[in-house]
Image (tube, rainbow, N blue to C red):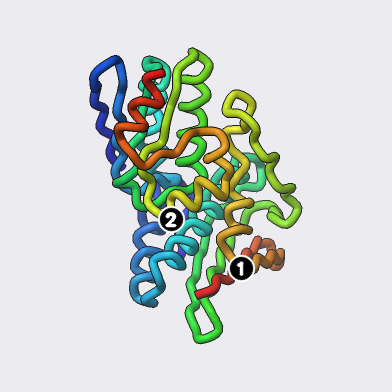
């Protein structure tokens, strides 16, 4: 699946991942985790692409086998390694809590393994899920 | 993503969200939700018809709760489904915004 880096394309991506999870007969919990991580990763690409190194396209692929479920997300924007993002501060009160910055934390918690690679001018995020 | 707003007794506002509160869904309702948060002081946000939530949905709820708390009011989340509740807990939102599963208790909590 490949979309332009444009929020107007998100519905197409959402439709694709829902159908791919259904086709693979993933459990409700695993399908939710896969869809959550895709949404977070793509939201980051849209957000971080607002500078000079904006991605032109986002590609996603879902591989399901006996060894597990793997979601791969690639984009041609500037380097962005989620491993370098510090865990969010634990919020104490709503008045002082940050409104954002939770996406990478959710990806780490809802996937079983996160691998990042930069090659050929592209970011490639590989996420594994327990089934 | 749909959002219905209903005024119930005692100046309490019930906001019913329906659909996927993902990046696209949050973008579709953020203006309308922010207007409610800016105008109201006692808000119950019913998530029982929200099947999916990601961090931009969380951002919407935290921003709304901040706006309402600043005025001395209260926002409570009502009846998230199991997966949505797991996202809220993982993000630490249950420490910031009360999450309740009983409508009467939620109404009582914002009334105070």
Q: What residue is drawn where x is 68% and y is 62%?
A: A121
Q: What residue is drawn where x is 57% and y is 37%?
A: B95
Q: Which residue is mark 1?
A: A112
A83 with respect to A105 (left or right): right
Q: Which residue is mark 2?
A: B83
Q: Residue farthest to the bottom?
A: A66
Quadrant of residue B11 in the image? Answer: top left
Indicate whether B38 appears above or below A59.
above
Spot occupied by residue B27 in the image (x, y as percentages of width and height)? 41, 38
Spot occupied by residue A113 in the image (x, y as percentages of width and height)? 64, 68
> Mark 1 — on which chain does it sit?
A
Along the viewing direction, whichever of A57 and A100 lies nearer the viewer: A100
Indicate whether A89 appears above or below A2.
above
Spot occupied by residue A39 in the image (x, y as percentages of width and height)? 49, 53
Label 1 – label 2 distance at C-alpha: 16 Å
> Mark 2 — on which chain does it sit?
B
How would you rate the neighbour count of disc 1 (Cα within 10 Å): few for under 14, some for 14-19, many for 20 or more?
some
Spot occupied by residue A112 in the image (x, y as percentages of width and height)? 61, 68
Along the viewing direction, whichever of A130 and A120 lies nearer the viewer: A130
Does dot 1 land on a helix, a strand or a loop?
loop
Query: Residues at marks 1 and 2, common chain?
Result: no
How would you rate the neighbour count of disc 2 (Cα within 10 Å): few for under 14, some for 14-19, many for 20 or more?
some
Q: What residue is drawn where x is 50% and y is 65%?
A: A60
Along the viewing direction, whichever of A102 and B91 lies nearer the viewer: B91
Q: What residue is drawn where x is 53% and y is 58%?
A: A37
Does dot 2 land on a helix, a strand or a loop?
helix
Quadrant holding the N terminus of chain A = bottom left
């Amino acid at each position: 699946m490949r979309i332009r880096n444009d929020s107007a394309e998100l519905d197409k991506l959402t439709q694709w991942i829902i159908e791919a999870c259904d086709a693979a007969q993933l459990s409700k919990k695993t399908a939710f985790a896969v869809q959550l991580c895709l949404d977070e990763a793509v939201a980051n690409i849209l957000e971080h692409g607002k500078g000079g190194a904006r991605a032109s396209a986002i590609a996603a692929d879902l591989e399901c086998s006996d060894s597990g479920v793997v979601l791969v997300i690639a984009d041609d924007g500037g380097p962005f390694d989620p491993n370098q993002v510090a865990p969010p501060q634990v919020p104490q009160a709503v008045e002082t809590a940050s409104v954002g910055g939770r996406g990478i934390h959710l990806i780490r918690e809802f996937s079983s393994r996160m691998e990042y690679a930069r090659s050929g001018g592209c970011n490639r995020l590989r996420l594994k899920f327990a089934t | 993503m749909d959002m219905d707003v209903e005024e119930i007794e005692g100046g309490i506002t019930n906001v019913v969200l329906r659909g996927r509160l993902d990046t696209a869904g949050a973008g579709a309702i953020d203006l309308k939700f922010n207007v409610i948060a800016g105008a109201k002081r006692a808000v119950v946000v019913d998530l029982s018809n929200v099947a999916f939530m990601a961090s931009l949905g969380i951002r919407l709820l935290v921003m709304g709760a901040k706006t309402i708390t600043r005025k001395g009011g209260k926002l409570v989340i009502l009846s998230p489904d199991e997966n949505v509740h797991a996202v809220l807990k993982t993000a630490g939102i249950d420490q910031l915004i009360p999450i309740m599963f009983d409508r009467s208790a939620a109404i009582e909590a914002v009334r105070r």
